[in-house]
Amino acid sequence: MINRIIWVVLDSVGMGEMPDAEKFGDVGANTIGNISKAVGGLNLPNMIKLGLGNIENIKGVEMCDSPIGCYARFEEESNGKDTTTGHWEMGGVVSKVAFPTYPNGFPKDVIEKFEKLTGRKVIGNKPASGTAILDELGEEQMKTGNAIVYTSADSVFQIAAHEKIIPLEELYKMCEIAREMLTGEHGVARVIARPYVGEPGNFARTPNRRDFSLIPPYDTVLNKIKNAGLDVIGVGKIEDIFCGEGITEAIHTKDNMDGVDKTLEYMKKDNKGLIFTNLVDFDMKWGHRNDFKSYAKGLEEFDLRLKEILDEMKENDVLFITADHGCDPTMPGTDHSREHVPFLAYGRKLKENVNLGTRKSFADMGQTIADILKVEKIKNGESFFKEIKR
């Protein structure tokens, strides 16, 4: 009997354009493949051993003659290419209607209401790279005490403030005010606190980022697991993405390696159910900044740590590794990309070398987890547990 699943999301590690990528402006996107090509190959022996290079149409990764894992690529059924949409679909929520985006900034009435409720004026109010907006407006923000509000191609309302000018507690409160405001027509997927430190010309975002998401419209697999009396442990920004819904315990992390450390710590404990981890550096630090060299290094660093995860797994553990969307750092622009995502599964109770092909919805992962843990089914997705269990 399998009683625990370790589910690791490599945030933005896509593996090639979806059939509808043209609608999203993402023809040619291939996060893993293009990074591998740009750096002359990726050294990922542990993921290759699980079957990464055997996934249909993956580029830039070697095949394995006898992989010990199960593997697939997944299409996203939802209308989007962002963190919330991707994670929610994994959990069983398919978003047919895209969250609102603001290519010209937020409407005047939205900004004016935000200013009135927070008592601080807004500067920016446009789509921008998170680091570029600090270079442009960070000094002004420090001098005036105004808040930098910006967005991206994703459905986000982001508030940047220097930690010495607007304390974290106040910044988080401002985000809560924005979250309460932004519903209905302006129901953005996430309000994000983007604190930073430093001096003009040398600003740096801090690990104190917080995401304030919408509540999922109906129960996800997390709720089903929690309702069954099992553990649902969120590592990284999982708690924020699901607005705390279905979570029994959560811890935020500083970076990818801290995320792996915290995952291993929970694996050493006597818990049953789900350990759900998001490793965000791929997306936040490297994908959005077009830093393909650091992205490649980050993939190789995770692969090294993957051996520790595999060694720590108990007899009744199963490991899932996947991604939530793409963010190809070799493409023009700094936005997410509409890509297939890779999927790897491993456990002593699972078969070896099972090719699951191309799955039509991320929700299949959540439905399979519900099946494995023998909890109530979720609304969407088809379980593939029968195909992988011994």
Image: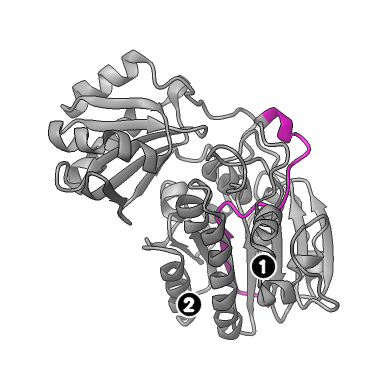
Question: Which amino acid, mark 2?
Answer: Leu
Residue 25, x across and y down, in percent:
66, 31
Query: Going 41% across and 49% down the picture, which residue do you hit?
Result: 240
Residue type indicated by callout 1: Leu
65 or 372: which is nearer to us? 65
| Callout in the foreground (2, 1) | 1
Q: Quadrant of the C terminus?
A: bottom right
- The magenta stretch spans residue 17: yes
The location of residue 151, given as percent across then percent down, is 42, 32
Element under disc 2: helix
Which numbered circle lies on residue 264? 2
Q: Is residue 115 left or right of residue 151?
A: left
Identified at 57% across, 41% down, the residue is: 336
Circle 2 residues within 10 Å: few <14, some 14–19, many ≥20: some
Boundaries of the magenta span: 1-23
Tell me the CA gap for discs 2 and 1: 24 Å
- Measured along the vertical axis of the image, is residue 238 above or below residue 233? above
